[in-house]
Image (tube, helix red, strand yellow):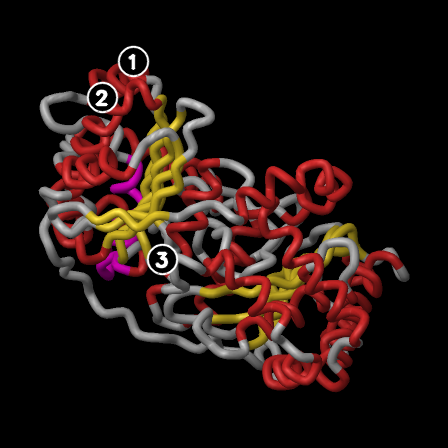
Amino acid sequence: MRGVPAWQGRRSGQYLSSVSALRADPPSPTRGEGGRLYRAFATLCFALFFLLLPALAARAEMNIQEVKSKEGVTAWLVEDHSIPLIAVRFVFDGGSAQDPAGKEGLVNLMTGLFDEGAGNLDSDAFQQKLDDAGAEMSFQAARDGTYGTMRMLSQEKNEAFGLLKLAVDQPRFDQAPIDRVRAQVLSGILTNERDPNTVAQQRWLRAIYGEHPYSRSDQGTKDSLTTITADDIKAFHKANFARNGLRVAVVGDIDAATLRNKLDEVFGGLPEKQTLAPVADVTPKLGQQLEVNYDLPQTSLQLAWPGVKRSDPDFFATVLMNEILGGSTFTSRLFSEVREKRGLAYGVSSDLVDNEHSHSLLVTTATRSDRAAETLSIVRQVVKDMAENGPTEEELAAIKKYLIGAYAINNLDSSSSIAATLVELQVDNLGIDYVKRRAALINAVTLADVKAAAKKLLSADPAVMVIGPPLAGGGKG
């Protein structure tokens, strides 16, 4: 899952990371493969992997069907009749990067309103109907997409799909819910204004992206939220919720013939084409050091290098390199040098950030403020060594086995995670047979490929952000 709406108070992990600020997306199960959303879980439960292997192997060999409705709505379906549940996941192209200038936060505000009344049901009546149907519904605003999720009991699917149709096609956007959800968002913004980490993240976005839409908070600002009207929300809904920008995945106790009808019921009445504003590609501005000075006992560090597109031929070589560098929680080079050998930080990691219009590789950690300059120097040295020498054959062989073996745990461990994965495979145009081809794609990467990817990306001068007291000596070692 990509996460929760910003108005519900999304926060970073156990130590400060501005990864979420640069990505400005809820986490995805496929963008940046080997990402850390489930990595800690996978590592701690690795012993269970062998007990779960038969079931997970079956998941990896699951039958993915392409179902196309009479109105041309396409979904990927995995039937599973073992339990009476259905998980639905979908995305429309166009997220918070579509917020008009001066009305930042519009898309995020909209996603908080779909279950606040639709059709002839006001907010209370709609919520009661959801409860009666035993269904769960949520919507999330990402940078480049607007996501929806629904879980339902299969015996109540007619009622649940009917409510989803109302939410998608006939949301009310009544003024009272708009004011209530807006107040929740504003409360979060006011709280964040007193949070050094959030203030720093916003400064980082502006430094990295300049005037690009990615530099803006998906929550908006106090000023921008007050300008958003019901008409603004209705206009964006009409422009965004159209069939040509839609991708759907369904997993659970439903067959293809039934789903075909439900697709038209829910999405068939939407306009055929979206009318979205163009968003330019942007290269993060590297080679700068941003210090956000606060008198804190712990200093947070973030470094950004160039990334790689999901469609790039070097993508898997970059994924493997990143895992060896800092992606694999307890076995990476950064973890070994920063945590195990020197005890400088509780955690340190690297992540590939893959947005539609920008790509980067981020290293994040946090340490005692009096050791921050030393920690930054060690991180730079580890990255420099990877750029100059690359990994060893032994490191590459081990990480290949891990990435192949952990995929089912990370991405196919529940109906909801399967549905989320299938949507992202569609977003990335990877093909319905990707799960079966993935291991071969990883195994085809050579040591020379990984070394070339490391040299290409990590030889650049990174952007650096420091949150804490001023660094001794500037921290550029």
Q: In which quarter of the image is residue 257?
A: top left
Coordinates of residue 419 in the picture (x, y in percent): 41, 43
- Residue lying at the far right in this picture: please name it: 341
Q: Is residue 159 above or below residue 98?
A: above
Nearer to me, 221 or 320 = 320
Between label 2 and label 1, give the one nearer the viewer: 2
Tell me residue 309's x, y (percent). Answer: 46, 73
Residue on which the image places disc 3: 426
Q: What stretch is highlighted in magenta?
A: 98-112
Is 151 one of the magenta-colored residues?
no
Mark 3 lies on a secondary structure that is helix
Mark 3 Cα within 10 Å, few/some/many (few <14, many 20+)?
some
- Name the residue carrying label 1: 132
Is the residue 289 above or below the residue 159 in the image? Answer: below
Q: Is residue 365 left or right of residue 123?
A: right
From what the image shows, is residue 458 above or below residue 234? below
Q: Mark 2 points at which residue?
A: 159
Q: Residue at x 78, y 69 (%)?
A: 395
Rendering quarter of residue 453 = bottom right
Report the front residue among 256 and 149.
256
Give amino acid for label 1.
Answer: Asp
The label on residue 440 is: none
Mark 1 or mark 3, earlier in chain: 1
